[in-house]
Amino acid sequence: MEETWATSGTSSSTTPGTTPGTSLGVDLHLETGGDASRHGVREGLTDALRDAVRGGRLTPGTRLPSSRSLAVDLGVARNTVADAYADLVAEGWLTARQGSGTRVAERVVTPPVRPTTPRRRGGAPTYDLGPGAPDLTSFPRAEWLKAARRAMATAPNDAFGYSDPRGRIELRTALSGYLARARGVHADPGRIVITAGFLHGLALLGRVLRARGLPEAAVESYGLNIHWNLLHRAGLSTVPLGFDALGTDVSGLGPDSPKAVLLTPAHQFPMGVPLHPDRRAAVVDWARREGGVILEDDYDGEFRYDRQPVGALQGLDPEHVVYLGTASKSLAPGLRMGWLVLPSGLQDEILDERHAAGAYGNALDELTLAEFIESGAYDRHVRAARLRYRRRRDQLVSALAARAPEVRATGIAAGLHAVLELPPGTEQSIVQAANWEHLAVQGLSGFRHADAAVQQRDALVVGYGTPAEHAWAGALEALCRVVG
């Protein structure tokens, strides 16, 4: 049977007031793997120490407990530990010097020689122009840390207890003010539910809608498979709507259509056009008339360049539109922070579903984001990011005009990506050429719903927000080589 020794010994003697078998210092965890019972305590201890060094748990230079201290912790004779140390010193695993104690030896590990193979182009990308992500190197670490410190210093005691399933009231209050001011959302704090990102919120909605008896949801012809698949897992089939120059065609919504629709009205993903005002009004009229619900994905509503801000659709009818927001594009997806602004008729069902799943947020992160918003740091960060991404967009358009004039950039008035229209029949070959240039790009065909009745278009979806600042020039140069 495997035996485990856990010790806490780095001091060479016990302290007055302690009892035998206890000592002061760091813990040392050793697993004998059964050797102690088969070959004796000394051999088992020697093998356990050797394995800890070989496996990297005891790193070079680590000082080990004295033989006296380790013997007390393990309940073995001191000579047993001394002999095990001596064996490993002789083998070169440990060193023992007067005044320095016993330490893990500083060893130079020579990696195994691997046969060389001819180097080929391809492999892991050097540059990533995939859409849907911000420049992570621009995350405002210093300001976030300041907000975290202020949040921790002022956090009420109940923040360390079991959380409200809606999320911290401080964050919901901060979001209520920000969303009303910046996106035109009617967002009472009581109707906001904090989620672990957009996907978490969409999953909750999908399960609630299916529990209501809805068999399907209407979606846009272009979008993300992960969203459609998530609705499928909730038990809803997806029915794509048409698409044209005015955005998603909502005329297909009627009495016999699905009673829920997922839209990106401010900036259609990935085509980049806003939903035409007439269609915004039409889809809200449909929801009122048929008792439908609109799921509004406002994934990058803060980033606009050459147009007036397009307010959230939710502002037209808060009782028929669920607003889904996220910090993934404005800050970083690693925060796992999103929010739902719910009609009154959905709130209890969403909270019941969340309670049943047992998934609650991190109160300290929520308090930090609340402080970040209330201090004005969020607005400052968004404005700085907007300028940075606009500069990149302008550089992209200028470079294409000079080096690939037959490639037209569309959907560029807002957001973090552009659609590059390509000559017919060239999408797949250009994506392959980009792979050989160590450039990650995605073709438009990968965003088309399998059942969409839209004309085949050859294009690239290029995320100019994704690269780090120092990598942007190289990524743009690689892209021009591929499409030029």
Image: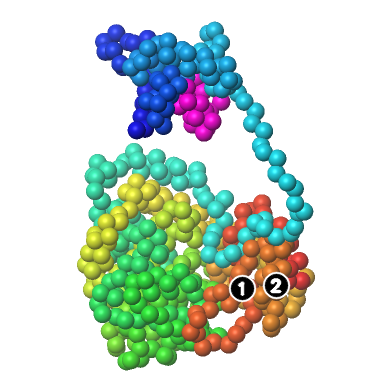
Q: Residue at x 62, y 57 (%)?
A: 467
The reply to whether the C-beta atoms of the residues labelled 2 and 1 are less than 8 Å apart is yes
Q: Nearer the viewer, residue 443 or 393?
A: 443
Residue 48 is covered by the magenta coloring: yes
Percent of width and height locating residue 2: 36, 32
Residue pointed to by mark 2:
430
Which one is nearer the viewer's eye here, 368 or 333?
Answer: 333
Identify the residue at horizontal 75%, vertical 76% (top origin).
405
In the shown orientation, is residue 112 left or right of residue 416?
Answer: right
Q: Is residue 421 above or below residue 278?
A: above
The x and y percentages for residue 125 are 65, 58
* Residue corresponding to mark 1: 443
Give, as a three-letter code, the residue at label 2.
Ile
Q: State the SS at label 2.
A: helix
Q: From the viewer's perspective, is residue 229 above or below residue 239?
A: above
For disc 1, the neighbor class at 10 Å (few under 14, some 14 to 19, many from 20) is many
Image: 318 above or below 257: above
Disc 1 secondary structure class: strand
Instruction: Identify the amino acid type marked 1.
Output: Gly
Image quadrant for the C terminus? bottom right
Give me the C-alpha separation between circle 2 and circle 1: 9 Å
